[in-house]
């Protein structure tokens, strides 16, 4: 898996429309489930931290504050932090 490839793929596919935001939340939830089944290693930890920063920077917090906070918290938990 290339470092940062997943973050770039998310940025390319996210057009900030309402439908796209809901789809992106579904994608992020699926990634959380994926990370939870992996045994963490440095590459996964780095990828998850980058994803947390991406969520904080690009997801519309004003529309979905509770859901965005929940996603960030679940990502942190998925790597044991």
Image (tube, rainbow, N blue to C red):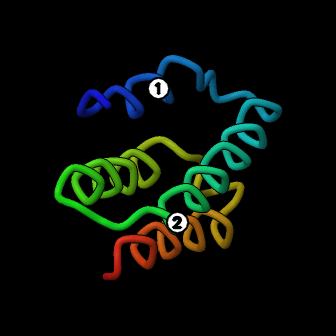
Q: Residue at x 61, y 61 (%)?
A: 33
Q: To which residue does mark 2 refer? A: 37
Q: In the rendered image of this protein, does residue 53 appear above or below residue 65? A: above
Drawn side of residue 17 relative to residue 16, left or right: right
Query: In the rendering, at what x and y percent does residue 48 appear?
Result: 35, 55
For mark 1, does the 10 Å Cα neighbourhood hold few (<14), some (14 to 19), or many (20 or more) residues? Answer: few
Front tag of 2 and 1:
2
Drawn side of residue 63 relative to residue 75, left or right: right
Query: Which comes before the other along the chain, label 2 or label 1?
Result: 1
Drawn side of residue 45 relative to residue 60, left or right: left
Drawn side of residue 62 relative to residue 22, left or right: left
Q: Residue at x 22, y 53 (%)?
A: 46
Q: Quadrant of residue 62?
A: bottom right
Query: In the rendering, at what x and y percent does residue 27 appear?
Result: 66, 43
Q: Residue at x 41, y 32 (%)?
A: 6
Q: To which residue does mark 1 refer? A: 11
User: The residue tagged with tag 1: helix, strand or loop?
Assistant: helix
Query: In the rendering, at what x and y percent does residue 7 appear?
Result: 39, 33
Query: In the rendering, at what x and y percent does residue 12 appear?
Result: 50, 17
- Image quarter hosting the N terminus: top left
Question: Between marks 2 and 1, how big is the CA–CA gap?
Answer: 24 Å
- Image quarter hosting the C terminus: bottom left
Q: In the rendered image of this protein, does residue 38 appear above or below residue 46? A: below
In this view of the protein, which residue sits in the foreground, 61 or 9? 9
């Amino acid at each position: 898996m290339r470092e940062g490839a997943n973050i770039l793929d998310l940025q390319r596919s996210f057009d900030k429309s309402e439908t796209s935001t809901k789809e992106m939340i579904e994608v992020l939830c699926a990634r959380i489930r994926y990370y939870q089944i992996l045994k963490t290693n440095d590459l996964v930890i780095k990828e998850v931290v980058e994803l947390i920063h991406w969520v904080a920077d690009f997801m519309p917090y004003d529309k979905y504050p509770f859901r965005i906070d929940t996603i960030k918290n679940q990502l942190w938990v998925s790597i044991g932090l």
